[in-house]
Image (cartoon, grey):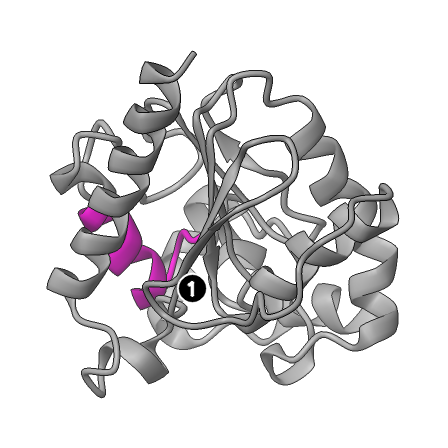
Amino acid sequence: MAWREQQAELVPPRFRGWVAHHGFWGRPVPAFGDRDPWLVIVGLAPAAQGANRTGRMFTGDRSGDFLYAALHRAGLASAPRSEHRGDGLSLSGVLISAPVRCAPPRNRPSPAEASRCRVYLRADLARCRSLLVVLALGCLAHDSVLRLLREQGAVLPDGIRFGHGAFWRLPGGVFLVDSYHVSQQNTFTGRLTAAMFDEALRRCRALAAGLEEGR
């Protein structure tokens, strides 16, 4: 917590004008999006000068630029960019959550921190009565979703391991879909391209449509 708050004193020059106008959030970052989504996107943790600064998931850094542009292309976001909490952006059918709510040092949350924060992800998922698909961005998100299910008594088959493009139907009927995280480390190197992520979103929509047809 202390490290998270210290980042408000270490704002890079390029963000100082923004902070002077909007302030520095520096608190746990809540989920953002539709209150009754069919799709929940699970990330990792707020970036020190991203969501920790702006107070909105995936807002204020290149990861968010990539994510919201893709959601807008898919018709799931009202605009292609997320600027700040008061910019009027809305998501349709999508909630963005994370297993860790405070910015961790070096963007690497400890197991203890992830364990303490898991209650918030659990609450986010429990409120989603229309949930059909969970899109996990990265291995930590994938593992966090499975850990929640096991804690709730679900018996999961062996072999549910993270892999970009992989998907499984989980107990309760909800699908889990995996994607590489939208971090600069992945998008700048080409490990995750816009086309690859667009395909992951199309897969989520197709799986959701199949579930709705079967009801």
The quadrant holding residue 133 is: top left
- The answer to whether residue 1 of the structure is visible from this angle is no
Residue at position x 55%, y 71% in the image: 161
Which quarter of the figure is the C terminus placed in? Answer: top left
Residue 134 placement, left or right of 195: right
- 146 to the left or right of 111: left
Q: Is residue 31 left or right of residue 155?
A: left
- Residue nearest the viewer, comparing 8 with 180: 180
Identity of the residue drawn at 31% across and 16% down:
213
Mark 1 neighbour class, 10 Å CA radius: few under 14, some 14 to 19, many 20 or more? some
Where does the magenta region start and end? 58-70
- Residue at image location 53% in from the left, 18% down from the top: 35
Above/below status of 12 relative to 98: below
Is 155 drawn above or below residue 180 in the view shown? above
**Local secondary structure at mark 1:** helix
Seen in the picture, residue 117 relative to 127 is either above or below; the reply is below
